[in-house]
Image (cartoon, rainbow, N blue to C red):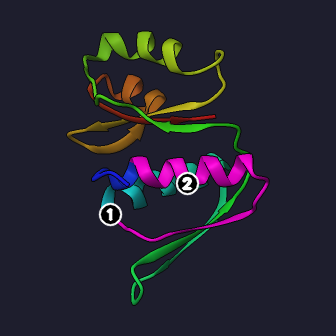
């Protein structure tokens, strides 16, 4: 395991999905990971997640997910360049989501383009 909690968690979710498991238990928590899971839940990539604050774990139920990965290195992009990276990481138009960390918080690439702000690329899923 590396020091990037979000990358490790997304890798665990991807591996569990490839192994046809519905539930995966993640042993480390971060605020960024929780925000990523919120957006994934909104986009139906995961069905639900349950945080156990005593054990500091998260139990994730996987939904309609094909692939999810962390973007390394975390490129800083201008508002004009978001489309270029969307084409690089996602398989087709209107399919999938790139997560961008902006000064207004974590948001999808669509929201960042609407707000006309850039930021740092965190992850993608579809």
Could you tell me residue 26's position as x and y percent? 50, 67
Q: How many marks?
A: 2
Query: Are there few (<14), some (14-19), or many (20+) residues within 10 Å of tag 2?
Result: some
Could you tell me residue 58's position as x and y percent? 50, 72
Q: Is residue 57 above or below residue 71?
A: below
Q: Is 82 on the left-hand or right-hand side of 92?
A: left
Q: Quadrant of the N terminus?
A: bottom left
Range covered by the magenta-colored residues: 7-30
Could you tell me residue 61's position as x and y percent? 67, 64
From the image, tell me which residue sits under label 2: 12
Q: Is 97 on the left-hand or right-hand side of 6?
A: right
**Of 9 and 82, which appears nearest the observer?**
9
Query: Are there few (<14), some (14-19), or many (20+) residues within 10 Å of tag 1?
Result: few
Please give the name of the residue rendered at 32% of the width and 10% of the height, measured from the top-left corner: 80
* Mark toward the viewer: 2 or 1: 2
From the image, tell me which residue sits under label 1: 30
Query: Is any atom of residue 42 visible in this view?
Result: no
Please give the name of the residue rendered at 47% of the width and 55% of the height, measured from the top-left corner: 9
Please give the name of the residue rendered at 39% of the width and 90% of the height, measured from the top-left corner: 54
**Which callout, 2 or 1, points at the residue further toward the start of the chain?**
2
Could you tell me residue 111's position as x and y percent? 43, 32
Please give the name of the residue rendered at 68% of the width and 50% of the height, measured from the top-left corner: 44
Task: Identify the secondary structure beneath mark 2.
Answer: helix
Query: Is any atom of residue 44 visible in this view?
Result: yes
Q: Is residue 123 above or below residue 64?
A: above
Which residue is farthest bottom? 54
Decide whether residue 5 is among the magenta residues: no
Residue 115 sits in quarter: top left
């Amino acid at each position: 395991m590396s020091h990037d909690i979000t990358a490790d968690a997304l890798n665990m979710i991807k591996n569990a999905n490839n192994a046809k498991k519905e539930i995966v238990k993640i042993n480390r928590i971060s605020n960024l990971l929780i925000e990523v899971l919120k957006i994934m839940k909104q986009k139906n990539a995961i069905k639900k997640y349950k945080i156990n604050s005593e054990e500091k774990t998260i139990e994730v139920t996987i939904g309609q997910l094909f692939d999810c990965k962390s973007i390394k290195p975390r490129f800083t992009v201008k508002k004009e360049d978001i489309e270029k990276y969307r084409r690089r990481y996602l398989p087709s138009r209107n399919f999938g989501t790139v997560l961008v960390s902006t000064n207004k918080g974590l948001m999808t690439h669509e929201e960042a383009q609407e707000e006309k702000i850039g930021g740092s690329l965190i992850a993608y899923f579809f």
